[in-house]
Image (cartoon, rainbow, N blue to C red):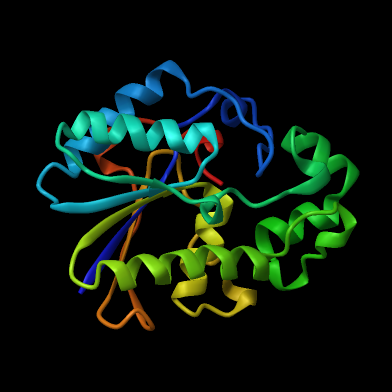
Amino acid sequence: MTRIFFIRHGKTQWNLAAKYQGAHGDSPLLPESYHEIKLLAHSLAAVDIAHVFSSPLPRAKTTAEKLIEALDRPIPLTIDSRLAEFNLGLMEGMKFSAVADRWPEVLDNFRHHPDKYDPKVVKSESFESVINRVGAAVHDYVQQFPNGNIVVVSHGAALNAAINGLLKVPMNHLKDRGGLSNTSTTILKTTDGKDYQLEKWNDTSYLHKTSVDPTDTI
């Protein structure tokens, strides 16, 4: 059996500012995110991790590197462009509020009705494309490690779509579980690389947060 630990990267300056980063934007991790990555590492201390795979975008790559550093044991790291964030086209770099003003229907469908989302309006990637490329990467990892634990460090929108895709959730119910928070852990398991079971969704208990910040989750 393979267990896949999906990690959303640490919180960044643009996350805090409620701006879309997407596949081409990026911003530095917040100072407190480095501490949260150490807490994440502590939560994984007892897990025998065979390999870490990461998106090449700096916010994810840094999270992966700091996680391995905090775990303080030799774990191979592979950077895979298929794990990059959802290409959000014209929305990238814009504040959520500005997107809501300019393309209210597009934003509502992106957040709540993926089956109705039209990527052509904002020149973005489609949900199907994200599900296929991230899903293909995960299938490859499972073939490499049919009996082990692997970590995948990626992004909120891409992971949300891809994980639900692996679980074969219909497109009109893709967002039913809600979003994924920064430095969260979601775990899937599979025995054959075809059927996946959800073990844990968006776990942030190890961060010991006392209040909910809406900019933590997408």
User: Which quadrant of the figure contains the N terminus?
Assistant: bottom left
- Is residue 58 visible in the rendered image? The answer is yes
Query: Left of 125 or right of it: where is 123?
Result: right
Q: Identify which residue is drawn at 84% across, 50% down.
A: 104
Give residue 148's position: percent from left, percent from top: 19, 64
- Asked if residue 147 is positioned above or below residue 21 in the image, the reply reads below
Query: Left of 144 or right of it: where is 7?
Result: right
Give residue 198's position: percent from left, percent from top: 33, 70
Give residue 78's position: percent from left, percent from top: 38, 47
Give residue 203's position: percent from left, percent from top: 32, 50
Query: Left of 55 or right of it: where is 85?
Result: right
- Asked if residue 215 is positioned above or below residue 34 in the image, the reply reads below
Say which of 41 and 142 sits in front.
142
Q: Identify which residue is drawn at 50% across, 69% down.
A: 135
Query: Left of 186 or right of it: where is 15?
Result: right
- Asked if residue 102 is positioned above or below residue 129 in the image, the reply reads above
Q: Identify which residue is drawn at 25% across, 67% down.
A: 145
Q: Identify which residue is drawn at 52% across, 72% down.
A: 165
- Is residue 209 visible in the rendered image? The answer is no
